[in-house]
Every structure is written in C-alpha cells, then in structure tokens.
Amino acid sequence: MERSEVEAKYKWKAEDIFPSDEAWEEHYRAAEGGVSLRKWEGKLNDAAALAGFFREQERVSQSLERLYLYAHMRHDEDSRIAKYTAMQSRAMSLFVRFSSETAFVEPELTALDESVLCSFLQDERLRDYDYYLRQLIRNKKHVLSAEEEKILALGGEVYSQFQNIFSMIDNADLHFGEIEDESGNRVALTHGMYSVFLHGRNRELRRRAFEQYYQSYIGLTNTIAATYFGNVKKDVFLMRARGYHSCLQRALEGEDVPVCVYENLIASVHENLPDMHRYIALRKRVLGYDEQHMYDIYAPLVEDAELKLSYEDACDLVVEGLAPLGEDYGSLLRRGFAEGWVDVCETPGKRSGAYSTGIFGLHPYVLLNYQQTTSDIFTIAHEMGHALHTYYSNANQPYAKADYRIFVAEVASTVNEVLLLRHILSKTKDEKMRAYLLNYFLDMVRATLHRQTMFAEFEAIAHGMVEKGTPLTSENLSEEYLRLNRLYYGDAIVHDEQIAYEWSRIPHFYTSFYVYKYSTGIVSAISIADRILTEGGAAVADYKKFLSSGGSDGPVELLKIAGVDLTTRAPFEAAMHAFAETLDQLEKLLIK
C-alpha cells in the first residue's frame, strides 16, 4: 500500500510544523541569512552580554530545529523522494553553519577565569543555564581554542555521513526480494515482515526468511564494514582531538554519566548469564527441538495466545494499562492518538522501525510501522512513553533545560512497557495466557537488557580495536560478534553462521554508545514500575517530577528522584532477580 492510499487518521500531521513545503522554503530563506552570531564574539565576559547571546541563540536554534524536523519527517515518510532528502540535507547544512558560527562560544567561556564562570552561576539572568555552566566548568580541559573548535564544527556534515550512508543502504537500496508465505502467496520481505515471520510459528518460513534476509546484508558486508569503520574512526578522531582517554569516556562524560554505570551493567549481566542460558535451554525443551537455531529465538512458546489487535484496540489497551500513571497521563495519550501525533502504517520507502521526535513549543511525534503483533502493541506504549516524556519536559522546563539526555530517554518508554505487561498479566487467570505473558516479559528483558548489553560490549570492543590501531573488517567484526553471541546465548542453541553478520544491520551502531541506554533504561524501569505499583501516589508523583525535569541536572542524578541509583549494583541486581523469578514461574507452568 502506497502512502497516498493511507487514511489521514493514520498519518502524523507534519503540517503542524509547516503548512506546506512552500512555507518551509520561505522559512528557510529567512533563516539562511540569520545563522551568524559573530557579533557576540569577544563580548561574552559579563553576565548581561551572555544572557543576551543565549536569548538570540535560542531563537535561531528553535528556528533551525523546525526546519530540520519537518524535512526529516517528510524524508522518513518516503526516503525515495529526492526533494525531501535534499531538504533534510539543506537543513543540516544550516545547522552545521550555525555550529561553525557559534564555535567561538565555549572556547571564549572556558578561557575566562573559573571565578568568573562561578559568578555566572549566581546571576538570576543565567538561571536557565546553570547546569550548562556547571558542565562547562567540569569539561573545561576538553574544549579547544576558538579556531580549533571552528574546524571541528565545520566537519559536522562529514561526521554524520556514515549514518546517512547506512540509512540509505538499509532503507532505500537494500532489497530482500519476495518470499512464499504459509498460504503459498509471494509477499515482499521487508524489515517489518521479517519481524512478523520471525515471531511466527512456521519454522520453515522462519528459516527461509532468516537466511534470505541476512543474505542481503552478507552481500554488502564489506561496504557496510567500511562504513562502520569510518564511523568508529570518526569517534576516535574526536576522542583524541579533545583529549579523552577512550571513546567510551568521551561518550559517557558528554552525557554526565559515570563510567561505573557502564561497568555495572556489563558485570551484572555477565554474572547472571546462567539464568539467560537456563531460559534458552527452557525454550529448546518446550519447543521440542533437537537443535534450536537463532531463527527460533522469537518463536512463541505458547500456542494461540498472542494478542492480535487492530491499531485502535491496541491504543485503548495501552491507555487502560497505563492508568496507574493518572488521568492526566491517560488524557495526553488519547490526545496524541486523536490529534495527528502518530504515523501508523508501513509503506514503501518509509523508514523502518519506530521512534519518537519533537521540538520545543510543539507536540511530539511518533513514527510506527504497526503490525498486529504483541510486540507492536508494546511498541505503541514504548514510543508514547518517549513522547510524553518530551511533553512533560517541554511543559515544565525552559528551552535551555527541556532537552533531556539520551541516557534517560529509554526510561519512560520502558516504564510504560513494564506497566502494560503487569496490567495484562493481572487481568488473566488462564494458564496459557499467563505463560505467554511471562514468556513475553522474559523476551523483553532478553531483547532490551541482555541483547543490548551484548551490543554495547561489541561497540566497546570495536572502538577499542581502532583506538589501538587495528582496522575493522567484515572478518574481525563478525568473529567478535559471533564470540559474544556464544557467550550470551550459551550452548542450548546453534550459533548459525548468518548471526555473525548481525552487527551489519544495527542502525543504532552509527550513534555510538547509544544501545546500552536501552539496558539501563529497562533496569531503571523495572524498579520504577514496581515502586509505582506498590507505593501508588507518592511514587507516581516522584516519577512525574522526573519526567518534568528535562535536562536540569545530570541524568543519573535525575533518576535518583524516581528512586533509582545506577552508581550502585542494586537496580541491576533487582532487574536480574525479576528475570530469574519470572523464569521460575514460567518453568512451573510449562514443565509438569
């Protein structure tokens, strides 16, 4: 089905940003001549001037964000339309110019005496920027001279090209062909349909889809490896240019996250891998296979129990499941579903997967590719968690503090998933459905905690190799990935040769050290959801305070508002305990 055939109620309203492409062009022309803030150069040595600069910077920045969001959304509706690819590129070019024209700011501020910077923290006119200024003081040693910062800023478009190249390969150029489904019909194998087949009961269809899907990536493995190598080399270049010890340190310090959080995550997962292996062994036993393969990992353990709902019914269930968060939260959900926040249907050329996006002063947006599966019902809850986190932050913080760190971006989304799952579990007494839901929770933890931690460990290894001067190739990337796959999944599964190439299809690897946040997100979410369900109103109030906090402090500190301290092993161990306890319950239901 082409996009033109999709009903308007299933499309997001990009026209809420600009009513037309012509309006975008008019705004672009107006913005094009106003990206330079050079008149402030050399004048940021007192609080009044700095406050004036920040006001003008905010005005320009919000204008450019509108331009980019509109072009980005139109491009993601159909990446085959060259006009929107060009518009997105033009908007990005303005951002790069703006970054270049404001590259003098941090060097100029960090050149000031620390006592002057500290005095800014006491000035009421700069209250909205107190966290920014504290971070500036802390990271002072990593900011370069004005000329050096300008050169780095000019490289902005180059830095993003590796991600853009992979996106075009993955969404526009890669074709997976057609495959014969269970009814003998020839259907297009797409990203979305691959997921449907892999979650299906027909093992032969899973195998064929798995092999055909991966063959497309294997055919381009050297090109993709070179693209990923370029992305990692970019990270190493920026790490060395700014004087960090490692790419991991640069990434985490850039988000004000202690490295111990990353270390706590991997160490806790490693220590508890025996429970993961026990789950994989249970799957093999229940499925009755002599050999369990990687294409069996999503096979349902319970027959005839999956939730298959229309989009409207799925939205109703999400609202019902998130009722513990209060009527105001439910009202916002219903508003989002009804007022054009969500783009629902998979169509040719549309970006795969799902995401939430937004800008200050406007409602958030959600992209879906909805299929009638349990996974996609939870995707609605997940992405609306992102959207409402953005909504609460924008409504309660000034522009300078509204944008929360990526580190906490997966917390609200995963709280929604956990609450929805607990709600559905609480409604059913049927053993088959209970087993299905317990298994769903285990698969959610496996995919969001164990699998993403494996991805995170792979990223750390790949970056470490390049930091030591080892080039990345399809061969050594696949070798490392297969080794980790064996470590994480254990001996109760066949590690098919295709799975060694899974690294080549993960788009998040082009936003380096992003995926571990899914893991810390579900760790945090399990603790927060349990507290909401056991403590009620007080926990909900703390949680909404966290949602409303935006980027007003370090993300690890903000999570403490909701009762989670990731600098300790406690929340990680609690999540692992929840996994093991759920596995115990499932074993009792399935093994009698």
Image (tube, rainbow, N blue to C red):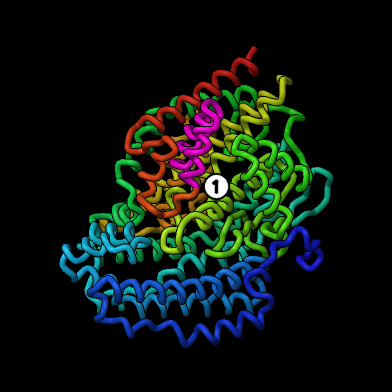
Q: Is residue 453 magenta?
A: no
Q: Is residue 333 above or below residue 362?
A: above
Q: Is residue 540 magenta?
A: yes
Locate the C terminus by quadrant. top right
Q: How many marks?
A: 1
Question: Could you say where residue 322 lies in the image, as x and y percent from the top left?
Answer: 63, 38
Secondary structure of the magenta portion, mostly? helix
Q: Is residue 99 above or below residue 571?
A: below
Q: Residue at x 31, y 58 (%)?
A: 466
Question: Could you say where residue 94 lies in the image, as x and y percent from the top left?
Answer: 47, 79
User: In the depicted view, which residue is nearer to us: 476 or 298?
Assistant: 298
On screen, residue 466 versus residue 587, left or right, reads left
Q: Which residues are magenta?
A: 518-547
Quadrant assignment, res 178 = bottom right
Question: Could you say where residue 147 lies in the image, as x and y percent from the top left?
Answer: 25, 79
The residue furthest top is 592
Q: Is residue 335 above or below residue 87?
A: above
Note whether residue 295 is visible: yes
Q: Secondary structure at mark 1?
A: helix
Q: Say what amino acid the circle numbered 1 marks.
A: Gln
Note whether residue 301 is visible: no
Locate the N terminus by quadrant. bottom right
Q: Residue at x 66, y 35 (%)?
A: 299
Q: Which residue was labeled with disc 1? A: 498
Q: Is residue 156 above or below residue 396?
A: below
On screen, residue 279 versus residue 255, left or right, reads right
Quadrant assignment, res 142 = bottom left
Q: Residue at x 34, y 41 (%)?
A: 261
User: In the depicted view, which residue is nearer to us: 40 or 577?
Assistant: 40
